[in-house]
Amino acid sequence: MKNTIKLLASVVAMTASVATAQAEEFRLGLITPPPHIWTKAAEAFGAELAEASGGEHSVSVFPARQLGNEAEMLQQLQTGALDMAFMTVAEVSNRAPDLGAFYAPYLANDITHAGRILRSDTAKKLLAPLAGQVGAVGVGYGMAGLRQIVSRGEINSAKDLAGLKLRITPFEPILDFYNAIGAAPTPMPLPAVYDALANGQVDAIDMDAELIWVLKYYEHADTVVQTDHMMFPMVGLVSARVWAGMSEADRTMIGDLMAKHVDSTIDSYIEREAGWLEQIEGTGTKYVKVGADFFGGAVDEWNGIWSEKATSLDALRAVAAETE
């Protein structure tokens, strides 16, 4: 009888322990500032997860590189020190080169087309290997706006970019593109960009319309060139170690909700990008619209480099052609 009571007590204790382990406050990191669309989507994900789980799960969102830069946060995801992140595909592509194909110059005709590419089955299949490649489970894509160029000097042709210190996000696809142009690509974290452009530490920046407008980069520019030359995807990630410890029900709930909210950023940019560009054009800063011909042979040079680095490039080009 005593043994039976001890056994029952042990089972009760184990059950209580499992129940406690299932309730979780997750930490989610991003590099974007609090007002940014990605940050707002992360907060909305946390709120809906808390509601859907009946308060069992919550998400604390840490924007603006509070937990480190993306390379550091990716390392934290790998060890399980960080639970989740909304991260640029750029950073992830440093470890998963096939994702670099998303940055093919002029893969997308416009922001709406970029969204269709990211929502394709071909794009989604590229998420499957991430757990093994980077130590994090990819649940879905979001995006920022198409890339534009802001310059302290006058820009009339791509030749004017030659030799300029041009701020980039530090990853290979964009580095290869600006090397092909002959610029001097200069990696720099987002919080440093405004002052660097203002004081001449950099001559130009590669940026999307949202941040050009919201963070007022145009204030220190002589020229804004609307190039629309690259899409800029984001991916919702969960630490593979954390994922492995979840119940199947929690994986489904968390995966579906995170995918929903990262995907919502696509609609946000489709809806708002044209307005930001119009506002930038209306500031009085010289505003130039160009197409792929502006960059001369740089586009072909990039394609030659990345056709060998990313086996997914042909498949994504086929999707882009099908979804035009």
Image (tube, grey):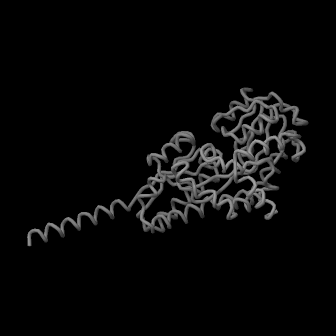
Taking the spot 69% from the left edge, 47% from the top edge, the residue there is 100
Is the residue 112 above or below the residue 153 in the image? Answer: below
Image spot of residue 196 (x, y percent): 70, 30
Taking the spot 77% from the left edge, 36% from the top edge, the residue there is 178
Image spot of residue 315 (x, y percent): 73, 58
Image spot of residue 312 (x, y percent): 70, 54
Instruction: Please name whichever residue, 121 or 270, is drawn nearer the observer in this view of the structure.
Output: 121
In the picture, measured across the screen, residue 156 lies left or right of residue 117, that is right
- Outermost residue, bottom direction? 1
Corner quadrant of residue 57: bottom left
Instruction: Please name whichever residue, 277 or 136, is drawn nearer the observer in this view of the structure.
Output: 136
Q: The C terminus appears in which quarter of the rendering?
A: bottom right
Taking the spot 73% from the left edge, 52% from the top edge, the residue there is 313
Taking the spot 23% from the left edge, 64% from the top edge, the residue there is 13
Is the residue 304 above or below the residue 322 in the image? Answer: above
Q: How many marks?
A: 0
Q: The N terminus appears in which quarter of the rendering?
A: bottom left
Image spot of residue 43 (x, y percent): 55, 56
Is the residue 322 above or below the residue 311 in the image? Answer: below
- Outermost residue, left direction? 1
